[in-house]
Amino acid sequence: MGFSQKIKEIRSKPESVRMRYVWFLTFLSTIVLLGVWVWSFSLQRRELKMPSLSGIVEPDAFREDKEKMQDLSEDLSKSLNAVSKESQISENTEMPPSSAENNQNLSEDDMRDSRNDSTVSPEQSSIQEKAE
């Protein structure tokens, strides 16, 4: 008995029997599809548990990167410590007043005296004359 013969036989039966065939085949195909889905899901989980060899990173590469990062961290902390020490030293020592502040503190007589001082070199006197 062929497939087309079986279809002709089912068509000749009453509608209630044909509906039983429809529901049975629908249920059977649903079970098959769910089975395929569960099977593919289990394969995906198995692949996640066992990564491929191309995705494995050698531990030596991690070790080298870790050492580089530790060296960088040490260099950075040394630099920061040196900067903080320099800033503490500069805060503790008073800077001498600048030459502009010194000039403001001098009176005009003192400035005239310093211009007329005999120890002034010719180059300094020419600079002072240009400034006047």
Image (tube, rainbow, N blue to C red):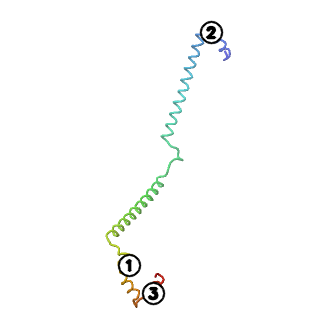
Look at label 3 and name its amino acid: Ser
Q: On the rendered image, what quadrant is the N terminus found in?
A: top right
Q: Residue at x 46, y 54 (%)?
A: 62
Q: Residue at x 55, y 23 (%)?
A: 30
| Residue furthest out toward the bottom | 118
| Residue furthest out toward the left | 92
In this orientation, which residue lies closer to the viewer: 68 or 47? 68
The label on residue 125 is 3
Q: Quadrant of residue 104?
A: bottom left
* Residue matched to label 1: 103
Provide residue 90's location: percent of width, then percent of height.
Answer: 35, 70
In this orientation, which residue lies closer to the viewer: 51 or 68? 68
**Which structural element holds mark 3?**
helix
Examine the rendered structure and indicate whether residue 70 appears above or below residue 43. Answer: below
Q: Determine crowd level at label 1: few under 14, some 14-19, many 20+ residues with C-alpha closer than 10 A.
A: few
Foreground disc of the pair 3, 2: 3
Examine the rendered structure and indicate whether residue 79 appears above or below residue 103. Answer: above
Q: CA distance from mark 3 to mark 2?
A: 130 Å
Q: Quadrant of residue 89?
A: bottom left
The label on residue 13 is 2
Look at label 2 and name its amino acid: Lys
